[in-house]
Image (cartoon, grey):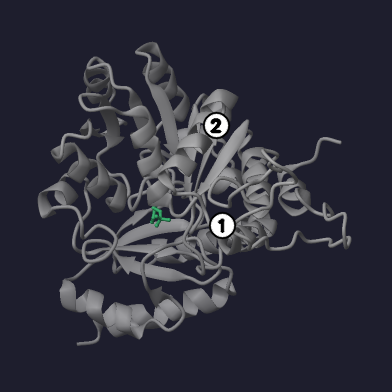
Amino acid sequence: MECKQATVAVHSGLNIDEQYGCVVPPVYLSSTYNFTDFNTPREHDYSRRGNPGRDIVQQVLSELEGGSGAVMTSSGMSAIHLLCTVFLKPGDLLVAPHDCYGGSYRLFDSLSKRGAYNVIFIDQADENALKLALAQKPKLVLIETPSNPLLRIVDIQRICDLAHEVGALAIVDNTFLSPVLQKPLDLGADIVVHSCTKYLNGHSDLIAGAIIAKDPAIAADLAWWANNIGVTGGAFDSYLLLRGIRTLSARVLLQQSNAAAIVEYLQQQPQVKKLYYPALENHPGHKIAVKQQKGFGAMLSFELDGDEQTIRRFLSALKLFTLAESLGGVESLISHTATMTHAGMSAEARAQAGITDLLLRVSVGIEDSQDLIADLDNAFQAAVTR
Ligand code: PLP
């Protein structure tokens, strides 16, 4: 029976325990597995290479993204690093978005400076810049849409087509939307990468990553390298991630409807100088978002009118939004991009990407939306009080 995504997220891997009939798969903590006889290993021999719990979560991830195989890794960064290690040699080129996640930017920048590979950061919405970059015959094109923190949207299908014309693999970082709201493999991407730390787990109590590939040979190659390098996810983390994924659809849809209510409120706030959310018709990526996404997600950012003191007063008055990095958890978070998530980028690089010192990024949780709005309202009042 072909099931919908929300059903797959709940049912994949249930009732597979033959010994006790456990409905939920147990946590397989053993690091090693006995051989049944001389030179006769079982399906698993060592937990870095394969763990039954990790197998289950990899299977669910693959099904949710519509791939042919997945690798769960110790973090989103180790997943991204694994991809670069597998596909890029010294001299090979990676084309990345100029406003990609700050940690990805730092990784590409630092490793390219050591000669591991070359990277160019471009505005992928700029067709000319894209064509110039692709003319240099990259091996990999990384797409991140919506981007962090300005929610810029790029056309996945278009960029994948152009990347394929020059023989490059197209990778999409789908962390911000999750497969509930965007399916990059259906739009032509070869590989999807996630920070599972975010929406997939959804409870801010785990660091993990995942790679999902369309081609089974690529999926197998990535699994081989993940074991070789030693970046596979741990047993307990696999269990936690699977538990988080069970409620993925319900969480993401509620977070998204809370975000829509907050955006409506923020639009009426005179202290909000700029508001970034792809559902807004004046958002430059709105039309593409409508075309390629199943919703607008629960991330938004805005610029406060004022100075550092205004930001300080606003943030310290908030009670329900925690000042913290990360996103995608059930609790609402707020971060000051320049000093937190994107502090690893130089001031010039931030300016080039359009990230000002007055920008705040919000990850909307599943609390009651009226409570969240009341909290913001109180903070706006505190911010203007001198
Ligand atoms: N990709 C995106 C879009 C992210 O936001 C993050 C982390 O914030 C990462 C990758 C890295 O993931 P992790 O923190 O799990 O290593």
Q: Quadrant of the N terminus?
A: top right
Quadrant in the rendering for residue 122: top left
Q: Residues within 10 Å of mark 1 (few under 14, many from 20)?
A: many
Which residue shows up at 34% across the image and 78% down it? 380
The residue indicated by pointer 2 is 219
Query: Which residue is nearer to you in this view: 128 or 99?
Result: 99
Image vertical order of residue 76 relative to residue 384, above or below: above
Which residue shows up at 31% across the image and 83% down it? 316
The residue indicated by pointer 1 is 256
Q: Is residue 269 left or right of residue 19?
A: left
Q: Quadrant of the C terminus?
A: bottom left
Q: Residue furthest left?
A: 348
Amino acid type, residue under disc 2 in the picture: Ala
Image vertical order of residue 48 relative to residue 98, above or below: below
Query: Which residue is nearer to you in this view: 346 or 21?
Result: 21
Quadrant in the rendering for residue 53: bottom right
Distance of label 2 from label 1 (alpha carbons) = 31 Å
Q: Is residue 29 left or right of residue 206?
A: right
Q: Is mark 2 within 8 Å of ligand 1?
A: no
Which residue shows up at 74% across the image and 44% down it? 37
Which residue shows up at 43% across the image and 18% down it? 161
Query: Which residue is nearer to you in this view: 44 or 216?
Result: 44
Q: Residue furthest bottom?
A: 386
From the viewer's perspective, is the residue at label 2 or at label 1 nearer?
2
Q: Is residue 226 left or right of residue 135?
A: right
Image vertical order of residue 38 relative to residue 93, above or below: below
Query: Where does the image place residue 334, in percent across and percent down from the top left?
Result: 38, 69
Image vertical order of residue 86 relative to residue 52, above or below: above
Q: Which secondary structure, mark 1?
A: helix
